[in-house]
Amino acid sequence: MAKIDDYRSVVSNEVVDELYSISKHLQGKVIQNINSTAVGGGVAEILTRMVPLLKELGINALWDVIKGNDRFFTITKKMHNALHGVDIEITKEEFEYFLEVDRENFSILDGNAHIIFVHDPQPVALVEKRKEFKSKWLWRCHIDFSNPKENVWQFLKNYIENYDLAVFSAPAFARSLSIPQVLISPSIDPLSDKNRELTGNEINEVFERFKIDRSRPIITQISRFDYLKDPVGVIEAYKLVKKHVDCQLILAGGGANDDPEGEKVLNEVMDRASSDPDIHVLLLPPGSDIEINALQRGSTVVLQKSLREGFGLTVAEALWKAKPVIASAVGGIPLQITHKYSGILTLTVEGTAYWIKQLIQAPEFAYNLGRNGREHIRNNFLITRHLRDYMLTFLSLIT
Ligand code: UDP
């Protein structure tokens, strides 16, 4: 795993020196991160790198995962969808069961923590215990909160307002709250296996293993199999393109432990894909970082056709690889893509298909988009910036 000093060659000496300077004020402080899954999805992705890097900087960062059963995660998935504006009813019993499971998890709270750092709605009610702890409480929201279902938002708000501070990913998600809020964008780690440079052989090996022909254009979307990632819309866009241009589609992803809907979505995708041998649906086990890296690098165009999106780490990952990306103008994606400068923003199947065709047929334009995208990610969305923002936030709470 990369060390802090290894980032000097990616960002600058000043950026890394500043991390050391800030961290001097946080030596030995205990920061307990709590979320609902150790693998799958963006939060786990970030914590996997953030926690060891904070430790290297002398901060005692811990990471614990709440335990829940299928019923709990079915409810939290419904809440997740409702917070993204999907019209779903959550019953009183379901809210009560949600609280019951959070309360069963009180025992993971660490009495020595200077800061208890809770990620996303699933563990939000742990804050009921705050009176018994001297810790400060920080709630981090990774989802698109721009248009939540009111009753779910009101339910959550009661808990969020017991925290000391709330962190959102994008200005559009900030809500009216009685506690202070800060905006901190997520990030990717340029030196992880997911994002580091790969050799031509490493990329070829992955494509050969999945039996994908590299001599024809390849369109790829990497995502959990989730309706909000719109894999079916991706297939429809591909089919429109395929009428005019010979190309292939890769839909690759796995599940997350806290997402029980994945199997249903995957089955639907398999169904739609079964008649076309040029559609490759790849089910990736956890830890498929080099595979994802190679698939992104070996693609002609990368898609992220989400209907809702918190930030969309997969967009940052593909832009970092200087790929032309076509993504929906939702959630945090417009923070990453300026239309026709560092990628393409679309909202429809037809728009997506139109731009796939354009980018396949205009490789120089596509190349420029990718190059601009990479610089935008370097300047704004690498883990070094994220570490700095988190440490400054910790300092604001405990000194
Ligand atoms: N990812 C992964 N394996 C998969 C699907 C996704 O490792 O099968 C990673 C992906 O590369 C990205 C993260 O999980 O780093 C997904 O984050 P994003 O913000 O795009 O979406 P989320 O899943 O959090 O909604």
Image (cartoon, rainbow, N blue to C red):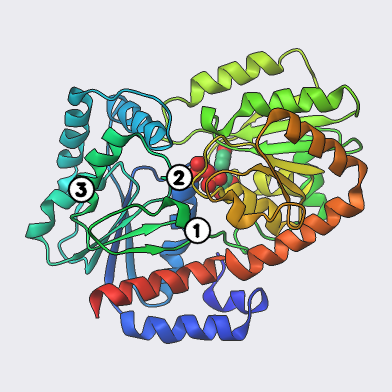
Res 210 visible: no
Front residue of this view, candidates 250 and 125: 125
User: Residue beneath label 1, please?
Assistant: 186
Q: Position of residue 208 (x, y in %)?
A: 80, 36
Local crowd at mark 2 within 10 Å, few (<14), some, or many (≥20)? many
The three-letter amino acid code for the residue at tag 1 is: Pro
Q: Look at the numbered discs 2 and 1 and tell me whether their residues touch, using CB distance below 8 Å.
A: no
Front residue of this view, candidates 204 and 380: 380
- The residues tagged by marks 2 and 1 sit, at their Cα atoms, a distance apart of 13 Å
Q: Which mark, residue 144?
A: 2
Q: Earlier in the sequence, mark 2 or mark 1?
A: 2
The three-letter amino acid code for the residue at tag 2 is: Asp
Local crowd at mark 1 within 10 Å, few (<14), some, or many (≥20)? many
Local crowd at mark 3 within 10 Å, few (<14), some, or many (≥20)? some
User: Residue beneath label 3, please?
Assistant: 159
Q: Nearer the viewer, mark 3 or mark 1?
A: 3
Quadrant including the C terminus: bottom left
Q: Which mark, residue 107?
A: none
Cβ of mark 3 under 8 Å from ligand 1: the answer is no
- The residues tagged by marks 3 and 2 sit, at their Cα atoms, a distance apart of 18 Å
Q: Quadrant of residue 358?
A: top right
- The residues tagged by marks 3 and 1 sit, at their Cα atoms, a distance apart of 23 Å
The three-letter amino acid code for the residue at tag 3 is: Tyr
